């Protein structure tokens, strides 16, 4: 999955999101009660967010026929979009632009992304980055991945600096 490996990427970047990758996000979801998951895969992220007491109002995935770029809303009232998007840059960038215009959006992205020029157009609408470190994408492996990851919060209404939070929430 990462740039430092020679493994072939899975179709549609379908990597189930492990609980340990989601748990550091929980303290930053205060006030969020409902969420949409437009890149749901097999639903692992939904399961973890439900454990935190959130209500999933929409679940979809391109592999089951729902193209997230074709939807302009996921429900009524206040909600957030929370997803582990495809990490192919061109597709991910389209999703960032699209999602942030709909609702505040949390995306699980590799941490190095923010340090590259390609991120510059998107960072002004990034309010928070919650660093989670390395992720163990394959449950039966004894190793974690070689990349550090973070949750990025995008919101078209955000103005100002991006807050960087370490794993302890500081």
Image (tube, rainbow, N blue to C red):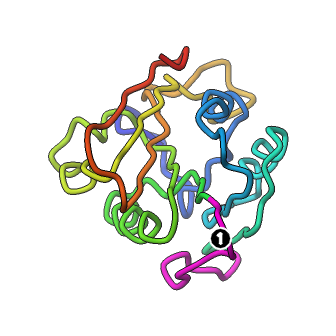
Q: How many marks?
A: 1
Q: Who's the residue at 49% across and 71% down the image?
A: 102
- The percent coordinates of residue 157 (x first, y second) are 36, 60
- The percent coordinates of residue 67 (x first, y second) are 56, 80
Query: Left or right: 12 with respect to 60?
Result: left
Residue range corresponding to the magenta coloring? 64-79
Asked if 58 appears above or below 154 in the picture, the reply is below
Judge by depth and name the residue closer to the eye, 158 or 134.
Answer: 158
Furthest toward the left, the residue is: 117
Q: Residues within 10 Å of mark 1 (few under 14, many from 20)?
A: some
Q: Is mark 1 on a helix, strand or loop?
A: loop
Q: Identify the image quadrant of residue 22.
A: top right
- The percent coordinates of residue 150 (x first, y second) are 46, 34
- The percent coordinates of residue 92 (x first, y second) are 40, 60
Query: Left or right: 128 with respect to 137?
Result: left
Query: Left or right: 45 with respect to 129?
Result: right
By secondary structure, the bulk of the magenta-drawn segment is best described as loop
Q: Who's the residue at 73% across and 31% down the image?
A: 139
* Magenta stretch encompasses residue 51: no
Asked if 113 appears above or below 167 in the picture, the reply is below
Query: Left or right: 131 with respect to 73?
Result: left
Judge by depth and name the residue closer to the eye, 1 or 84.
Answer: 84
Judge by depth and name the residue closer to the eye, 34 or 60.
Answer: 34
Q: Identify the image quadrant of residue 163.
A: top left
Label 1 belongs to which residue? 61
Q: Who's the residue at 69% across and 71% down the image?
A: 60
* Magenta stretch encompasses residue 65: yes
Q: Who's the residue at 31% across and 41% down the image?
A: 113
């Amino acid at each position: 999955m990462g740039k430092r490996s020679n493994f072939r990427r899975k179709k549609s970047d379908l990597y189930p999101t492990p609980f340990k990758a989601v748990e550091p996000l929980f303290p930053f979801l205060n006030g969020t009660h409902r969420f949409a998951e437009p890149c749901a895969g097999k639903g692992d992220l939904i399961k973890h967010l439900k454990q935190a007491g959130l209500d999933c109002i929409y679940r979809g995935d391109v592999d089951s026929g729902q193209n997230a770029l074709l939807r302009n809303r996921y429900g009524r009232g206040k909600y957030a979009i929370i997803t582990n998007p495809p990490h192919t840059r061109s597709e991910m960038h389209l999703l960032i632009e699209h999602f942030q215009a709909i609702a505040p959006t949390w995306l699980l992205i590799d941490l190095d992304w923010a340090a590259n020029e390609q991120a510059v157009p998107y960072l002004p609408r990034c309010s928070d980055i919650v660093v989670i470190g390395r992720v163990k994408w394959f449950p039966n492996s004894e190793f974690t991945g070689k990349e550090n990851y973070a949750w990025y919060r995008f919101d078209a209404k955000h103005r100002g600096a991006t807050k960087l939070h370490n794993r302890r929430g500081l």
